[in-house]
Structures are given as C-alpha cells and as structure tokens.
Image (cartoon, rainbow, N blue to C red):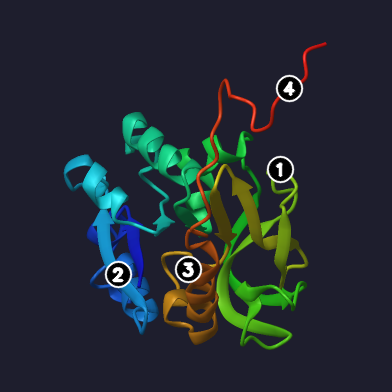
Amino acid sequence: MIRVTVWNEFLHEKVHEEVKAVYPDGIHQAIASGITGDGVEVRTATLEQPEHGLTEEVLANTDVLIWWGHMGHDKVDDAIVKRVQDRVLAGMGLIVLHSGHFSKIFKVLMGTGCDLKWREAGEKERIWVVNPAHPIAAGLPEHFTIESEEMYGEHFDIPAPDELVFISWFEGGEVFRSGCTFYRGQGKIFYFRPGHETYPTYYNPQVLQVIRNGVQWAAPSQTAAPIRGNHQPLEPIKAK
C-alpha cells in the first residue's frame, strides 16, 4: 500500500468564485478522488490546518507527498518546509504540480529561482511524451491535448532534470519542460506542469494517469539507508 498525502493551499477555492465553481471541494479533493485506487491510500492536508496538516506523524506515514500551491507560498512556515525537505532526503517521494514550481519546498530542493514565462489565455497545450520508456509515461499515447490551460514557457530556471519525461507546446508558440524528475538524497521528485486553478485540468483522465504513474514511481525504493560519517574498515588494512 502506497500512502499518499495530497497537499493544497485551499485558498483560491474560498475567495475566487470562478475557482470554486470548478473545484467546489478543493483541488486536493479532485486529485485525491482521481488517484485513489488499488494499492493507494490517500489523505489530504491544507495550509490553514495546524502545522499545515503536515505534522511529524502525518509525514512519517506518507510515502508520496503531492504539492499544489500558488497564492500562499509565503505563508508556508519555514520549519514545515525543513521538515518536508528532511523527509524527501530520507526517501519520501514528492510530486510538485503546476504553480508549485514557486513553492518554498521546490525552490530549496532545486537550489534555483524556478522562474519561467507565463500567460493566462485559455490556450491549447499539447503534451508530448519524450521518454516513452519511463514508468511515468506508462499507458499514455505519444501526445495528448488539454484544450484550455495557462501557458508556461522556457526558460524554466531549474537544474537540468535527471530525466525529462514530457515537453509541452502551447497554441501561442512556446514550449516547456513539463515533466521533470530529480533525485535528492534517497528521495525522488517529479514536477508536472498542468493544473491552473480556473481550468478543470485535474478531471482530465490523462493528467490523472500521469499523477497516478508518478505516485508509483516516486514511492520509496525500500533500499538500505546509507551510513555516513567516520567508518570502520570492512577489511583489515595492512600497516604501511
């Protein structure tokens, strides 16, 4: 059983009627409903809960954390960011969605500004699979289309991804590295671009398939934890 926590600010849905109309129960609930299935146990957490819903106990019982944020990046407590970072380095998977590229946790794990071009014009996005052998691309066609989305364009200020799974083309002409994986410590990170709050992207079956695949990929590998620091020799060392 993979234990997933879907984290969302849950702010837009409370103050913007156009967002509430698309996600009346919150983006987190739409994602949770879309990825729940055999072998996956899902809970949700939001910004305004105590400790942002990410207590030590919750994180200790989370194999993969999914993160959606936008208007409340600065409201996330630095101590919670450090707590999540430590868990990722210890092996917890992290999936960062859409505007989560500017979240504190993504920026600290990337070590860069994570800025990009953007435009909100309800334009077509075509997502191309550029690594068809990757498990995150399992079950997908060569490309799929989202009819209305916010544009993100290059240059995306991130380190070179360890693996590039998807690129996006937009109706206005831009392209974007929209599916990137990274390894940090024992943890695996997947950034996936689609998901602007005013569009019903998280009801799209292919978008949900990507997130489901991402959960399977990002789950802890269950390998032995590395031992660091001063270390006794495994074999006798001949005196010189």
> Disc 1 to disc 2, how far (Cα)?
30 Å
Q: How crowded is mark 4: few (under 14 residues within 10 Å), some or many (20 or more)?
A: few
Sequence-first disc among 1 and 2: 2
Q: Element under label 3? A: helix
Question: Is 46 on the left or on the right of 82, as rendered?
Answer: left
**Residue, x 29% and y 55% (percent of image)?**
61
- Badge 3 is on which residue? 215
Q: Element under label 2? A: strand
Going by the numbered disc 1, the residue's amino acid type is: Pro
> Disc 2 to disc 3, how far (Cα)?
11 Å
Sequence-first disc among 1 and 3: 1
Q: Residues within 10 Å of mark 2 (few under 14, many from 20)?
A: some
Sequence-first disc among 2 and 4: 2
Sequence-first disc among 4 and 1: 1
The answer to whether marks 3 and 4 mark residues whose Cβ atoms lie closer than 8 Å is no
Q: Quadrant of residue 143?
A: bottom right
Sequence-first disc among 2 and 3: 2
Q: Is residue 89 above or below residue 229?
A: below
- Badge 4 is on which residue? 237
Going by the numbered disc 4, the residue's amino acid type is: Ile
Quadrant occupied by the N terminus: bottom left
> Disc 3 to disc 4, how far (Cα)?
45 Å
Residue 191 versus residue 229: which sits nearer the camera? 229
Determine which of the numbered discs, if any, sits on residue 42 in the image.
Answer: 2
x and y percent of residue 74 in the render? 38, 35
Question: Is 56 on the left or on the right of 36, as rendered?
Answer: left
Q: How crowded is mark 3: few (under 14 residues within 10 Å), some or many (20 or more)?
A: many
